[in-house]
Image (cartoon, grey):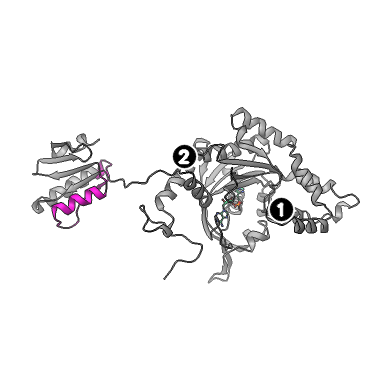
Amino acid sequence: MERLPGFRDFYPEPLPSHDAGWSFDARQYIFDKWRETARRYGFREYDGPPLESLELFTTKSGDEIVGQLYNFTDKGDRAVALRPEMTPTLARMVAAHERNYKKPIKWFAIPQLFRYERQQKGRLREHFQFNADLIGETDPAADAELIALLIDTLRAFGLTKEDFVLRLSSRNAWHEFYETGRDGVSPSQKTDEYDFFQTIDKLERTPPQESETKLAALGFSLADVTQFIESGKPTVELQSILDNLAARGLREFVKVDYHVIRGLAYYTGTVFEAFDAKGEFRAIAGGGRYNNLVKLISGGRVDLPALGFGMGDVVLLELLRARDLLPKFDATTDVYVLIEDEPLRAQSLKLTQNLRAAGYAVDYPLTPTKSDKQFKRAQELKVGYTARVESDDYVRIRNMKTREEVVAGFADVANHLG
Ligand code: HAM
């Protein structure tokens, strides 16, 4: 039996083979950094169900994600889907209980998400995503706060401005371009804005001739679009975000880049994506404003502006590996209790229990085992100390690094451990 394509096994380090690829230790390291940065920015953690009603995602995520859904009919005849992203769930949760929470709401989550994607580098059918969202504030100060969190999250891994760049853009700017870009087309005829956005989103991945044809069908020219992108002139709103980031000393991580427009249908204003600086990898993170989603999902009952981003673990890990920024993951056993004298097993178990209760990571031989094997096991576990019960009252402790030995009273062992 093999695992499904696009899914991962997470083994403890050291990895059994090269193609096992993913380690639980690296995953935990990434989650810890995500949590730690979110905490420093005052974000609270939440979660929702991995399975949702299909309708939640078909409402406003857009065709691309809907085409990638893992969906089925459950035994109660409900149309359901594994979550491909967290944002609709968050909008649903906030709409249901927004009165319980002071605004702005600053929440984060680390969900596992499922998308039936074409397999390629940096894209799997399952990934974990750090989501941070800020709800209930329209001011660009909120956009800057969130972007600062994104930048500081990447910096927490040791990545610098030589390693990544945040490309900042605005759907408002593109909306204006769309509205004013076609002379003689009345507003009522302008119903294809999302098609236009989709064409811009794919510009960098599509041959120019193809984009030209698509844009012409929508009443635009590639030359005008290219010129607009190259102008790179920040809107008033983007300038305010840039100034805010400059005050924090984070301006150098951000570049205005109108190539970015984002594929998801619900974005309304500021949009951004983080990429590695050399452009070798897929996007590390992406996000933006979605001021209408909560209203849409609550059927008009709750109207709250919002914005957020998602950062996947897959590209991030590839980048950290490439830049050699992952620590070595060693086992974390502190003490190995040697049991060379079986009559002392009961007292050895008591010592093990005491040390564990005091917070040490402790291991010992489960069954009678030869001394040399026990010592080898202690070495493999890279423990700091071995402890051998010598009598009911005394324990011999060996510091594995310095090789120093001391004999301590049974109740006094923890005082001899560093
Ligand atoms: P997204 O751009 O679809 O946005 O995903 C965000 C990030 O998740 C991507 O930049 C990428 O790192 C990672 N990612 C996405 N799909 C895959 C995949 N198949 N395999 C590996 N990694 C992947 C969203 O999902 C929005 N809901 C983010 C958001 C939160 N917007 C507002 N709040």
Please say whether residue 46 is visible from this viewpoint: no
Place of residue 164 in the rendered image (x, y in percent of width and height, measured from the top left):
57, 41
Q: Amino acid at mark 2?
A: Glu
- Label 2 SS: helix
Residue at coordinates 70% horizontally, 56% vertically from top-left? Answer: 206
Q: Which residues are magenta?
A: 356-383
Image side of residue 22 versus residue 64, left or right: left
User: What label sits on residue 36 in the rendered view?
Assistant: 2
Residue 367 position by quadrant: bottom left
Q: Earlier in the sequence, mark 1 or mark 2?
A: 2
Image side of residue 370 versus residue 283, left or right: left
Place of residue 293 in the rendered image (x, y in percent of width and height, measured from the top left):
67, 50
- Of the pair 63 and 52, the residue shown nearer to us: 63
Residue at coordinates 65% horizontally, 56% vertically from top-left? Answer: 61
Q: Is residue 188 above or below residue 71?
A: above
- Label 1 SS: helix
Q: Label 1 belongs to which residue?
A: 203
Q: Amino acid at mark 1?
A: Leu
